[in-house]
Amino acid sequence: MKKVRFGIIGLGNQGSMYAAHLFGGGKIEHGVVTALCDINPAKIAAMKDRLKDDTIAYFENYIDMLDSGLIDAAMIEVPHYLHPGMVIDCLKRGIHVICDKPAGVYTKQVKEMNEAAKQSNAYFAMMFNQRTNCLYRKMREIIAEGGIGELQRVTWIITDWYRTQKYYDSGSWRATWEGEGGGVLINQCPHQLDLVQWVVGKLPSSVRGFCEYGKWHDIEVEDEVTAYFRYDNGATGVFITTTGETPGTNRFEVSGTCGKLVCENGELKWYKNKSDSQVFSKSSEAGFSTPGTELINVETDGQNRQHEGIINNFANAVLGLEPLFIDGKDGIRGVELMNAIELSGWKNGEEVSLPVNEEEYLSYLNEHRKTSRFKAVSDDTVADTTGTFESKKI
Amino acid sequence: MKKVRFGIIGLGNQGSMYAAHLFGGGKIEHGVVTALCDINPAKIAAMKDRLKDDTIAYFENYIDMLDSGLIDAAMIEVPHYLHPGMVIDCLKRGIHVICDKPAGVYTKQVKEMNEAAKQSNAYFAMMFNQRTNCLYRKMREIIAEGGIGELQRVTWIITDWYRTQKYYDSGSWRATWEGEGGGVLINQCPHQLDLVQWVVGKLPSSVRGFCEYGKWHDIEVEDEVTAYFRYDNGATGVFITTTGETPGTNRFEVSGTCGKLVCENGELKWYKNKSDSQVFSKSSEAGFSTPGTELINVETDGQNRQHEGIINNFANAVLGLEPLFIDGKDGIRGVELMNAIELSGWKNGEEVSLPVNEEEYLSYLNEHRKTSRFKAVSDDTVADTTGTFESKKI
């Protein structure tokens, strides 16, 4: 059968892994790498040496690669600010594209990308590899089927992102407003900010973000966040994250009128009520009674194919073999949530409604970029301001 | 050996349990009930019938009991607003006293009580029976000994307080500003609001409270709260509680630079770091490295004597046999925290510093009492405004 021909833009940690381990390791059944691109000749040379595959063409300019006729699909593995522009460049040319997370730094930029996606017949996916995790898929399924009833509370403690100062010192763009556009929210948490809305089935209607900037590290962006969510049905939630604690916790709890789900330590527990607790409350003749609960240790399909699963699905979708698992346009939802938390943090915890005021967000972001430690050699476009990023060597 | 002679004020659920089960059951080694008091003759009659003990004197007026010469110590088992006044009446007379939680409704009132305690030679304890729980004692001990290093985060999800509407309908004073002075914070959570500061060793320096009033029940006070804490050393915390969910969660997590403690499902886990994570962060040459953690399933002394333990200790302290476990003056700390959260809730989540502005708090409280559903037959003193409380029949 025909294989989808892939080109990878950006040969940093992530791009190299895809090329060498997933494609090079024969893990993508209906996909093959035909081209690789990085602006850094040294990275190209290293990759050539590593892959020793003469069938792969190398490019220093990604536009040349897109226009080469050698690829059907591209993967975007470059700094956050560059994601939307490159995705648009692909889609305009009818080249299918998988973009790594996050979809972008701010919603205004991501909306332009999504607009291009609507105009294009090409496939567009986001690398939300955590959505392939059987635990999260099962949680989503149970919630969607009404297994916990009406949503009451979402609590995600995701504090196991410990990083040393050395990590932050390893790239001058790291943890800067100009280089990354944020801290733990945009670098470590895009998966959880996507999952928290994907699993639950909706975004909060408003958030408050209590962000601590450079609390545990010598950095200018946030390395600790506590966010408070409110949903349109009155449910509330808390999202806690930091790179300053170890061993940290990863506990995702969602409760509703018919029970709760707790995902922690690789296990999913479902506390399933015998009846709806709100209905019970209104009809019970006893003050201290409860509807009763059954604890189910949920069995899943055990599948957790991560990046490999996403790329295989994408290639199969392009070939018409199966539906696309992740619509790239969904990426805006996590960015929306992230922007709202960050904006609230800048406004000292003020309540911020979703969808976020994109102009206001961008205005605050640009203020922070002006005083950012990281000074890009740049012209006045967003993409180009990131010209000296270590991993922007495209 | 001599026994301390106790009088119990208030023969509701709690007072009856002490009289019949603990004292009546011979569980208080150095204490004996010699007098009981309730303003409701029917409750006195029921108690006489239940105890069938002619050595016990009964009173309808607690002052008469205090002045009878029949008791050395009193226990206060009446509505919250009445606690401080009655404690003061005891202490002024040199009568030792155990007050049930909370210490009071607002700090101004509790301060007057504590002032009286300082002036008195009598013993004064609070019924913080949860402090006898081996798990919480052990957590406190580990933290005090530096077992988790410098405090970073406190997270208590205590959402297993489910109550039906019937519970709230069972007393017209229940869940009203005038009758109780609050909802889940003052009725269900006084123990946790005490423990959260006792275990950690300090109160937050400021809080934000997101309180939902009558969200899950037809009541005027809060039945759901999410609070965000900040501590003087920069640590943060979250406290989540509600009476609207079931089965709910009770998970208390405290993390610091040298590890974390997690107390859930009757178990205490200590994740003990091999070195301080902040020191490690600054010295490590690797970005993704951690100091390493050892998991200890903490063994405790297994003791959890609850009310029985508190009363026995109190009687023993009065007799000079052992030190008093709980200084009643400590009760103000939980009230301080409760008031701060409630005040922030009234001010739409605004940050409130501790110690709370007691006049401001009282002014907000009194505003809410004015429009309270529960209208006490009252004169203009705080204590008397609660004159028709079901359990104020003293």
Image (cartoon, coloured by chain):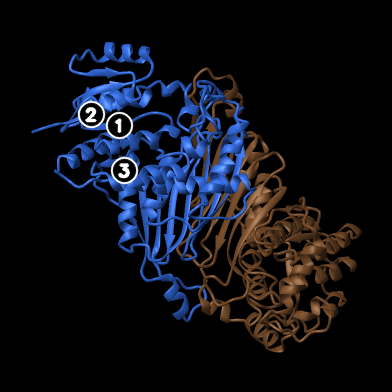
Chain colours: A brown, B blue
Task: Give the residue type that dot 3 points to.
Answer: Asn
Foreground of the two, A322 or A65: A65
Q: Please report whichever mark, 1 or 3, sits nearer to the chain's N-terminal start.
A: 1
Q: Residues within 10 Å of mark 1 (few under 14, many from 20)?
A: many
Q: Could you tell me which residue is drawn at 60 percent across and 30 percent down?
A: B372
Label 2 belongs to which residue? B6
The answer as to whether the residues below labels 1 and 2 share one chain is yes
Place residue A350 in its image quadrant. bottom right
Secondary structure of residue under mark 3: loop
Quadrant that contains the C terminus of chain A:
bottom right
For disc 1, the chain is: B
Q: Residue B75 carries which label?
A: 1
What amino acid is found at the position of numbered circle 1 in the picture? Met
Where's residue B141, x and y in %? 30, 55
Amino acid at pointer 2: Phe
Tell me how far mark 1 sits from mark 2, CA to CA. Answer: 7 Å
Callout 1–callout 3 Cβ contact below 8 Å: no
| Front disc: 1 or 3 | 1
- Pinpoint the chain carrying mark 2: B
Above or below for A87 versus A253: below
Q: Name the residue under label 3.
A: B133
Spot occupied by residue A33 in the image (x, y as percentages of width and height):
73, 72
Q: Do the residues labelled 1 and 2 touch (CB within 8 Å)?
A: yes
> In this rendering, would A312 be left or right of B183?
right
Q: Which chain carries label 3?
A: B
Can see residue B107?
A: yes
